[in-house]
Amino acid sequence: MTVSIRPATPADVPTMLRFVRELATYEREPDAVLATEPMMAEALFGSDPAAAALIAERDGEAIGFALYFFTYSTWTGRRGLWLEDLYVTTEARGSGAGAALLRALAGVALDRDCARFEWTVLDWNTPAIDFYRAKGAAPLDQWTTQRVEGEALVRLAGRG
């Protein structure tokens, strides 16, 4: 059973949103997903796409996906590829789908002259951390992610 990788299409939106919900449950945030199918379709396939996605398939069935977008580094003067989500269904883990998705994304990064390929991983998710380390990823321990959202975002914008 060979795993294949292909670009996502609008028809994949319901499956990708299901995967996002499954990922949120795995990451202990089952009620955190606010995205809807129309929102995801617009973000990925609308007139000004914010992101792109790849689908992992085995025997014609979607078993995982990776959603990514491009960033820009003023230090390198080049774009970077940011992996927002990588998910493989529980039953398909160990099939090579995750590795195939990472390999395909690395190819996208090289094809688009990206200086970096980055993502975050929850510090308790040791299976994912071990998987990423095995693929050559290195932690950026000196950096911490910062986030402003909700009312704090409104206040920061001076609108609240």
Image (spheres, grey):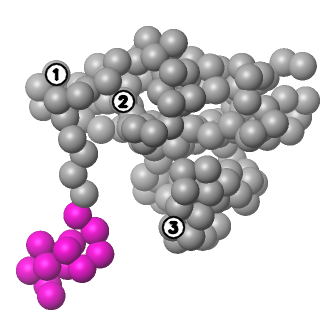
Mark 3 or mark 2, earlier in chain: 3
Of tags 3 and 2, the one toward the viewer is 3
Q: Secondary structure at mark 1?
A: loop
Q: Earlier in the sequence, mark 2 or mark 1?
A: 1
Q: Amino acid at mark 1?
A: Thr
Residue highlighted by disc 2: 118
| Residue labelled with disc 1 | 76
Residue labelled with disc 3: 32
Task: Say if mark 1 contacts mark 3, CB within 8 Å.
Answer: no
Viewer-proximal residue among 150 and 59: 150
Image position of 127 with respect to 25: above or below = above
User: Label 2: how many residues lie within 10 Å, few (<14), some (14-19) or many (20+)?
Assistant: some
Left or right: 152 as drawn, with respect to 92: left
Residue 159 is inside the magenta segment: yes
Instruction: Give the magenta-colored segment's residue range.
Output: 148-160
Q: Cα distance, mark 2 to mark 1? A: 14 Å
Identify residue type, mark 2: Glu
Identify the residue at image location x=50%, y=37%: 125
Residue for point 25% across, 26% down: 140
Horizontal side, residue 73 vs residue 21: left or right: left
Q: Residue at x 65, y 20 (%)?
A: 100
The N terminus lies in which quarter of the figure? top right
Q: Bin the neighbour count of mark 3 within 10 Å (Cα to Cα): few under 14, some 14-19, many 20 and up.
A: few
